[in-house]
Structures are given as structure tokens and as C-alpha cells.
């Protein structure tokens, strides 16, 4: 079954059925003001930081699914019948429906009994508000009298408090109508104002949720729609909403446009200014054009015409677009990441820069600097930071700091701006500062010399790339082969950087460290047939020929090829085993056999049932590393097969089995040991995006920047 198609010409995915198996979403905005929007207008908005500055509310995992959102209702005044052109929340059987998810915008069109409404939602470039551009058409052959309602539910700025301290939040919030604008704000006016307005006159409005929906009402059958008007409510506590009503008469074939603005400002006057400056069709036209030009330019930096249509679709449009979304939001906010717990991750965001390096290198540099600011003078770093506060959070992962070297070296190769290495960047906790080069040196030095275990391999700490491999049980002895390999890659990059800078002594030192690490890995981690994945806290091997479960791990093999630690013969042997033991038609699983039941020595992995996520699921992020390893071994056909296996468009005609969007990569697909083998999960925010782009462009097509070419 399919729920839509790719419109290649317009770089859009067109959803043709609203009842998608999960909400199929798009992102609005460019990393500051923005939000997510589903194909039925569900979703919410935030300003810079979905945790600390949320604008509208969303009920994750609620019933009914995907509520609330940015809603428009059309009411026929003759009959009192009403519908939503986005199908939700009213869910009337529409005569026509389509949602076009495009680059930076979503347009949803729906019609019933001769009336059609089409809303284009977008955030203009560089602005802190969104526009709902609503076009209403009378396709019938008689005059129609209609009322148009809008509805969005405001959220307390701090999204955690919004759920935790309901009495406090509701006592201090107000929602009022002034200057034709609905403002939602704290009584003390700290934290500014969320606002909503309709351009021009309207019939009535509501600022109170109960007043619009009715007590015990819901978005699908609001009291205001039943009555045919809003009640001009303002509220001095409780839940604020942005509801408006207008009346319009349309002759046959006549159409009219209405404009709505939603956003966040510091002062009331700023919203008035927006209303005066941008609240007209001409300005909206200009902003719309700017948005389209921005994205046209964005994807123009890379274009490939390969014989494979799916590869073209992804590389030329959707993969590049997703790379930008992961660059903006890391693993922070999606349909599956609630925009509360995780900010921008050191590990994740450093990897995300790889996908946009060819497009916006100077913006990636800025993000890299923000990430370097959460590095400690010792060389390790916080795990993540929150964009509004810049505050770091979490520590003790073995790999976080090593990803800096990959992002910085990618930046240097792309731009040739070696001067970046001399820029001075402070460390976390205000403990001094150092050049970028020194930051990088400290990162490799930390893993090489400071956090070394009994086998002289990097300690795993809380975890490595695999968050759920929690082997340190308090002895501080567990070691990661993954991190050893990542260190190998980082050391090679460091020696190249040092040569570029004419620091030959440094380069030789990095090479020496590289050889030492290579020897250690080959001496202690080679298990006769393949590389083990880790040593646990008691000296036991994880991913060993002698293990009963979790015997053979993908990353331990692919990364030893990436690092060059595996010499040719071993490299071929282990990558053949990857194919034989781990490959499936839907992607490569992380290891086999899966663990069955909780094992406290292993930790998080074993909380999952066999075949799910890190317990032997297809963790898509790890697949491109096997692609790259195969290209290094010059086995292009196998590399391309691995690459293609996880291409989302392949699911378009079987969308019911995959469930999630066929236009973006997902984090994981249930593996062959799971009864729902092939089901995709956790779409959009995943390192798969940047890495499958790198695997496709840099390695399969072989187009990658070097320092001198
Ligand atoms: C998702 C996390 O965002 C990422 O940092 C991690 O590497 C993978 N899970 C694997 O555990």
C-alpha cells in the first residue's frame, strides 16, 4: 500500500492519504524559530530550544494520535457542517486531500462539497515567526457563506514545567487579545510573549481553551464550531489558545487568501511591528520566494545523476534536506524525541556536520565551536548542550571528544581554512581556553594516555557510540574496541593536519600513537576469526568466538577497516563474515545472536527484546560504515547493495510494513529476530543521514575533498 509519491520536479513528497501509519512529518524553520508538522497539521512550534522555549503544545503518544496542531476549520453557515482541510482534527471523509511536504514548508489541501482550503505553512528565512497562508476556493456553482476558524494551543515556555507543575503554570499564564493580536505570556511578563494574529478583520476570537473547545470538548468537535462563533474569551489563568473566526462570502469560482502569523517575541511591540511590516500578501510573497531560493541554492551544491533513481532522490534532495535538519536539531526534537531530554549532542552533532559540510561550512564551523566549548581542559567533554542556555550536560562517554577531530578535519578539507586551527576557544566550566588545534590534541591525548584500561585500550566509561553497552560496573576497567578504532581514525586525521601545518614532530608523534594502538588492537582484540567488541569490567570478552550471545559485532569489524588497523587479509575475512552473519535484505544487524533477557553485566542492550534497536536490530547509523569499509576494500557491488538496502524510498509501495516516512532515514529497523522484522522506527534524527550521504558521495561515487584537491 502506498500513501503518497515523490514529486521530483518540485522536490516534494506528496502524501495522498491522511491516515498514514504514523504521523509523517516535516520541519519548519532553520534551527531558530520552528517546529514540526505532520501531514494532517499535527505538531508544534518552539523558539531556538524546544525544551526551554516552547510556543505551542503537543501531546506525544496521545489518544487520539497526533494532536493538537496548527488547525483550520471551514464551516458552512447554511448547514452548520464543518471540516478540516487537513482531515485532522475533524476527520470528515474529504472529497480531496493532499499534503505536500517540501523543503522548509508544508502545504495541506482538502476539500468537501465544493469548498477547498489549502494552507501553506512556513517560517520565513531569518524570522522568528511562522506564516499560515490559507487559500479558500469556492468550486461549487453557488454562492457560499463560510466561517473560517483557526486553532493552536499555547504551551508554557519551559516544556518540562508545563507537564510537571500544572497548577503553578496555569496560575501564572495569561492569554489576552490586544491590537488584534492574541498574546500568551506569564503574568510577570518574564520570558516574552507567544503571539498569534490574523491579518485584517475577523469575526471573533478565543484565548481560552475551555471556551473554544467546550468543557470536556476536543479539537475534533469544538464548541465554537458547533455554535458557529468564538466567544471573545481572554483568560487570566488556565490554558491559552490561539483561536480566531472570520466570515467570508464566496461566489462560484471565487477564491480568497487569508494570512495568519504565529511566533515568539520579547516585547508586545515586536509583534505589532511584525504585524505592520509583514502582515500583507506582498511581503508574504517576498518571504515565500526567499525561502524557495534558499533551499534551491542549498541543494545546488551537490547533484548526481546516477543510474539509480532512489539514490538520486535521496542524494539530490531528501538526504541533503535531512542532513540540515539533523544539523539543526541533533537528536533533540522529532516525533520520537520529545524536545525535552536531549539537547545537541557532542557525539551526534559532530557527526551531523559531515552531511552539510559541502553546503554550509561556515555555519558548521560555528556549531563546532559551540561543541568545543563544552570540552574540558583534560580533553573529554560534556555529552550534550542546550542551545538556549549553552549549558553542557552528562559526561563520561568514551567517544564524545574524539568526534571533534572528524568534524574539524572535514571542515579543513572542505574549506582549506587552516587558520581555524589557531582560533581560541574556551573550555567548559570557564577553565581557560586554547586553540582549536590544542583542543583536538587534548582529545586524542585523553583517549591515548589518560583513560586507558588494563589492555592499554580506551576505557568505555558510560558507553561508547553504542549508548547501551554499559560495561563499566564500578571497577573502571571495561574497554572499547570501537573507541580504539575511532581513535585510530582520529590519529590519522591528526597526523595529516600536523603535516599540513608543517608540524612534522607532532605528525610523527600521532603516527607513533597510531601504530601503538594498532598493535594493541591486533594483539588483544583479535579473537582468531574476528575482532571482539569490548572487554567487560571483569576482563571478559564481548563479541568473542567464545561468547554465547552477542558473538559477532558489526562495528568492531567495520571500524577496524576504517581505522586501517585490520590488514587486508583480516579485513576481507571479517567483512565477508559481516555479510554472511549479519546481512538481511533490510539492512545489516548490529550483532548476532541477540541477547535474551536482561544481563546486568551488559546493561542497556539487554533491556531490548531480540531484534530491537541495539539488541541485534538494524541500527541504520552503523550500516554506512560497512558501506565505507567495502569501498575501501574496493568491493563496490557489495557497498552499493548495503547502501541501497536502507534507502527509504524502497518502502514507498510497502509503507504499511515500514510505517514511517519513506523520504527520510530512520534510526532503526527491527531486525530478523523480531516478529516485526522490517518495521522502521524513529525517523528523521539519526546519524544515518550524514553517514549515508558520506558513504554515497565520498565513497561510492568517490567525490571527496582532500587538503590539496
Ligand atoms: C542514538 C544516539 O543518539 C547516538 O548517540 C548513539 O550513538 C546511538 N543511539 C547508538 O546507541
Image (cartoon, rainbow, N blue to C red):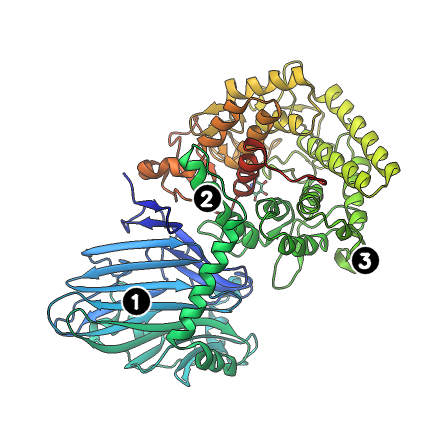
Look at the image and tell me in which quarter the C terminus lies. top right
* Residue 172 left/right relative to 525: left
Q: Between disc 1 and disc 3, whose residue precedes?
A: 1
Residue in front for this viewpoint, 689 or 543: 689
Residue furthest out toward the left: 142
Residue 358 placement (x, y as % from top left): 59, 47
| In-image side of 512 versus 523 (left or right) | right
- Residue at the outermost bottom position: 179
**Disc 1 target residue:** 72
SS of the residue at dot 1?
Answer: strand
What residue did someone put label 3 on? 431
Beta carbon of the mark 2 residue lies under 8 A of ligand 1:
no
Closer-to-camera residue (547/98): 98
User: Would you call the spot at circle 2 few (<14 residues within 10 Å), some (14-19), or many (20 or more)?
Assistant: some
- Pointer 2: what residue? 682
284 left or right of 372 in image: left
Left or right, 28 with reference to 73:
right
Estimate the x, y position of residue 643 in percent, counting from the top left.
49, 31
In terms of image quadrants, where is residue 561?
Answer: top right
Which mark is on residue 594? none
Q: Is residue 256 above or below residue 391?
A: below
The quadrant where residue 71 appears: bottom left
Nearest the viewer among 165 and 446 is 446
- Name which of mark 2 and mark 3 comes first in the sequence: 3
Amino acid at each position: 500500500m502506498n500513501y503518497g509519491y515523490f514529486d521530483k520536479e518540485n522536490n516534494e513528497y506528496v502524501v495522498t492519504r491522511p491516515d498514514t501509519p504514523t504521523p509523517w512529518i516535516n520541519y519548519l524553520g532553520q534551527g531558530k524559530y520552528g517546529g514540526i508538522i505532520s501531514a494532517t497539521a499535527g505538531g508544534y512550534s518552539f523558539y531556538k530550544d524546544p525544551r526551554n522555549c516552547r510556543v505551542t503544545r503537543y501531546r506525544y503518544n496521545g489518544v487520539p494520535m497526533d494532536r493538537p496542531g496548527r488547525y483550520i476549520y471551514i464551516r458552512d453557515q447554511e448547514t452548520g457542517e464543518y471540516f478540516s482541510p487537513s482531515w485532522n482534527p475533524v476527520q470528515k471523509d474529504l472529497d480531496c486531500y493532499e499534503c505536500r511536504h517540501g523543503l522548509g514548508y508544508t502545504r495541506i489541501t482538502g476539500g468537501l462539497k465544493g469548498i477547498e482550503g489549502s494552507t501553506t505553512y512556513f517560517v520565513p528565512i531569518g524570522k522568528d515567526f511562522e506564516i499560515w497562508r490559507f487559500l479558500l476556493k469556492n468550486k461549487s456553482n453557488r454562492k457560499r457563506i463560510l466561517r473560517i476558524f483557526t486553532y493552536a494551543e499555547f504551551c508554557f515556555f519551559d516544556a518540562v514545567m508545563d507537564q510537571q507543575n500544572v497548577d503553578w503554570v496555569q496560575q501564572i499564564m495569561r492569554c489576552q487579545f490586544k491590537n488584534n493580536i492574541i498574546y500568551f505570556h506569564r503574568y510577570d511578563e518574564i520570558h516574552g510573549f507567544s503571539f498569534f494574529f490574523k491579518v485584517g478583520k475577523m469575526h471573533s476570537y478565543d484565548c481560552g481553551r475551555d471556551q473554544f473547545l467546550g468543557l470536556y470538548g476536543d479539537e475534533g468537535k469544538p464548541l465554537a464550531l458547533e455554535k458557529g462563533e468564538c466567544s471573545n474569551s481572554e483568560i487570566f489563568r488556565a490554558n491559552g489558545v490561539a483561536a480566531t473566526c472570520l466570515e467570508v462570502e464566496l461566489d462560484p469560482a471565487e477564491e480568497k487568501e487569508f494570512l495568519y502569523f504565529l511566533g515568539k517575541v520579547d516585547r508586545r511591540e515586536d509583534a505589532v511591528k511584525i504585524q505592520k511590516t509583514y502582515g500583507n500578501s506582498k511581503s508574504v510573497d517576498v518571504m515565500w520566494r526567499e525561502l524557495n531560493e534558499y533551499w534551491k541554492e542549498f541543494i545546488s551544491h551537490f547533484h548526481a545523476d546516477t543510474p539509480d533513481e532512489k539514490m538520486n532522490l535521496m542524494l539530490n534532495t531528501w538526504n541533503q534536506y535531512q542532513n540540515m535538519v539533523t544539523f539543526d536539531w541533533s537528536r533533540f526534537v522529532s516525533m520520537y524525541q520529545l524536545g525535552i531530554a536531549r539537547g545537541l549532542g557532542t557525539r551526534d552533532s559532530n557527526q551531523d556536520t559531515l552531511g552539510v559540510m559541502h553546503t554550509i561550512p561556515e555555519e558548521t564551523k560555528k556549531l563546532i565551536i559551540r561543541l568545543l566549548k563544552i570540552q574540558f581542559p583534560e580533553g573529554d567533554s560534556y555529552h550534550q548542550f542546550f542551545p538556549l542556555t549553552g549549558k553542557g550536560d552528562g559526561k563520561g562517554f568514551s567517544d564524545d571528544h574524539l568526534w571533534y577531530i572528524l568534524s574539524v578535519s572535514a571542515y579543513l578539507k572542505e574549506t582549506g581554512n587552516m587558520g581555524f586551527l589557531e582560533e581560541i576557544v574556551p573550555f567548559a566550566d570557564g577553565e581557560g581556553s586554547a586553540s582549536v588545534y590544542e583542543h583536538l590534541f587534548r582529545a586524542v591525548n585523553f583517549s591515548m594516555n589518560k583513560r586507558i584500561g588494563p589492555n592499554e585500550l580506551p576505557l568505555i566509561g558510560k558507553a561508547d557510540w553504542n549508548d547501551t553497552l554499559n560495561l563499566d560496573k564500578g571497577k573502571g576497567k571495561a574497554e572499547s574496541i570501537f573507541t580504539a578504532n575511532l581513535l585510530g581514525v582520529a590519529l590519522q586525521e591528526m597526523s595529516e593536519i600536523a603535516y599540513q601545518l608543517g608540524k612534522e614532530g607532532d605528525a610523527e608523534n600521532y603516527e607513533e600513537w597510531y601504530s601503538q594502538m594498532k598493535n594493541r588492537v591486533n594483539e588483544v582484540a583479535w579473537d582468531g576469526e574476528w575482532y571482539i567488541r569490548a572487554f567487560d569490567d571483569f576482563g571478559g570478552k564481548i563479541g568473542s568466538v567464545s561468547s554465547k550471545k552477542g558473538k559477532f559485532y558489526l562495528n568492531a569489524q567495520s571500524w577496524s577497516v576504517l581505522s586501517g588497523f585490520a590488514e587486508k587479509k583480516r579485513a576481507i575475512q571479517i567483512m565477508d563474515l559481516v555479510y554472511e552473519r549479519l546481512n538481511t535484505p533490510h539492512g545489516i544487524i548490529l550483532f548476532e545472536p541477540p541477547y535474551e533477557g536482561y544481563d546486568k553485566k551488559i546493561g542497556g542492550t539487554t533491556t531490548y527484546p531480540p531484534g530491537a534497536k541495539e539488541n541485534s536490530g538494524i541500527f541504520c547509523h552503523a550500516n554506512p560504515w560497512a558501506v565505507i569499509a567495502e569501498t575501501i576494500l574496493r568491493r563496490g557491488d557489495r557497498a552499493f547493495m548495503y547502501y541501497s538496502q536502507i534507502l527509504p524510498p524502497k518502502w514507498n509501495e510497502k509503507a504499511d510494513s515500514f510505517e514511517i516516512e519513506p523520504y527520510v532515514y530512520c534510526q532503526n529497523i527491527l531486525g530478523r529476530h523480531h516478529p516485526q522484522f522490517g518495521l522502521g522506527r524513529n525517523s528523521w534524527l539519526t546519524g544515518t543521514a550524514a553517514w549515508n550521504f558520506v558513504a554515497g558521495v565520498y565513497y561510492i561515487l568517490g567525490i571527496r575533498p582532500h587538503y590539496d584537491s
